[in-house]
Image (spheres, rainbow, N blue to C red):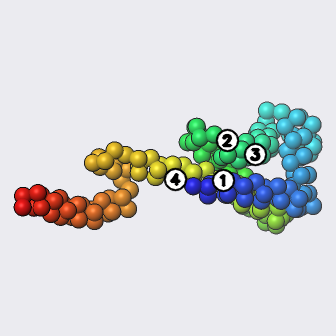
Amino acid sequence: MKTHRNLGLAALVVFIISFFLPAFEDMSGFASFAFCWDTLLGHEPSGNIRILSGGWFYYSGFVMSNILFVGLVVALFVTRKIRRVRSVFSVVCFLQALSWLVLFTISGKPAQITAINMGYYVWLIAYGLLVIAHLWKRMSNQGAAANRRPAGQPDGSGNLFAIVAAARAFPAAVAELDRSAADAHV
């Protein structure tokens, strides 16, 4: 049951390591974050991004994703509420991180793709681990809820394994009832 916490802790460690590695050209993860932070504050680090423009929203989204990352890891440890919302946020943050690679790939500029360094990929792995941790917790909680159903009620989850297990157990249960009834009549 602690697997989701271990995954969350691993995601946090990988996330922190990614900031020390080169992420883009000669910038480390810290330098990339500083660039995005300056863009969020409107300091126009590249000189051509205006507040409330598309570039501003895009680079500010990286800042928000990084802040949410830490919050989502903490949420794995401290709360059991709003699991679905946390799972959705973790997926959205992962897609935000992945969008950078997708954007460079779609732009058709191979120089930009080769400028992406190991730090970015490690950062992306951290987001992937976070998504897996949240989905793992959600799936394990759904499985536990299905196992807590009252006796005699069918498993309505559509879980094939639960249906097969119930189908295999049914003949044995009927045979046991028949033996019990036969012993009671003797």
Label 2 or label 4, whichever comes before in sequence order: 2
Rounded to the nearest angstrom, the CA distance separating label 3 from label 4 is: 22 Å
At a point 72% along the width and 59% down the height, the residue shown is: 10
Q: Which mark is residue 140?
A: 4
CA–CA distance in space, label 2 to label 1: 10 Å
Q: Residues within 10 Å of mark 3 (few under 14, many from 20)?
A: some
In the displayed structure, would residue 99 be above or below residue 169?
above
Measured in 3D between alpha carbons, the distance from the residue under mark 2 to the one under mark 3, in whole angstroms, is 13 Å
First-in-chain label (3 vs 4): 3
Q: Which residue is mark 2?
A: 78
Residue located farthest toward the left when viewing the structure as drawn: 186
Quadrant location, the N terminus: bottom right
Residue occupied by mark 3: 70
Q: From the top left corner, tell me how far across and down residue 11 is, in percent.
A: 72, 56
In the image, what residue occupies the spot 76% across and 62% down?
121
Residue 74 position, x and y percent, is: 71, 44
What is the C-alpha distance between the residues marked 2 and 4? 17 Å
Q: CA distance from mark 3 to mark 1?
A: 13 Å
